[in-house]
Image: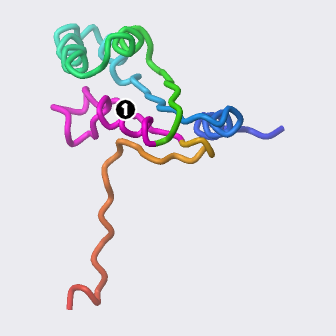
Amino acid sequence: MKYKNLGEILCDYAKVTGKSYVWYDAKGIRRLEDAGDTDKLNQVYAFYREFLDELLYEEFFHSSYGMLEYSNDIAAQDAAEDWFPREAQVPDADYYVYACAFNESGAIVWENVPVQTPPASEEDAE
């Protein structure tokens, strides 16, 4: 038996279909629901309501996870960047929704994770 994590399954799916996808994980918002924090929950939904299109917002409102199909990776990345800001671009951690875009080959071409700056080498510091 070979175990596959969700990322591997999504990569395989993109390869098989030959399509690009945006996948999001909004389970953090569900934690607000579980905690009964309706004021914060309403703020988060109002934040996303400003820039998600109507159909995506409806799905986003009702589901912790979602995947959207695109004809190419440029369109997938453009949509993901418009709809799912990086953590540094949201008011606080409760607003953050992880998202990534897969290309037709199954590779992740974009993620809304913090951009890592490589540490300066000792040679650069001299």
Is 27 or 53 nearer to us in this picture? 53
Which secondary structure, mark 1?
Answer: helix
- In the image, the segment drawn in magenta is 74-102
Is 25 placed left or right of 81 in the picture?
right
The quarter in which the C terminus is drawn is bottom left
Is 61 placed left or right of 70 in the picture?
left
Is 119 placed left or right of 23 in the picture?
left
Residue 124, given in percent of the width and then of the height, sits at 25, 86
Residue at x 38% of width, y 11% of height: 55
Is 119 or 85 nearer to us in this picture? 85
Q: Tell whether position 90 is magenta.
A: yes
Residue at x 32% of width, y 11% of height: 54
Figure check: 113 above or below 17: below
Q: Quadrant of residue 38?
A: top left
Question: Three-letter amino acid code at disc 1?
Answer: Ala
Q: Quadrant of residue 106?
A: top right
Q: Quadrant of residue 116?
A: bottom left
Residue 31, given in percent of the width and then of the height, sits at 35, 18
Is 25 placed left or right of 45 in the picture?
right
Q: Which residue does the numbered mark 1 point to in the structure image?
A: 79
The quarter in which the N terminus is drawn is top right
Is 22 or 61 nearer to us in this picture? 22
Q: Tell whether position 87 is magenta.
A: yes
Residue 3, given in percent of the width and then of the height, sits at 73, 38
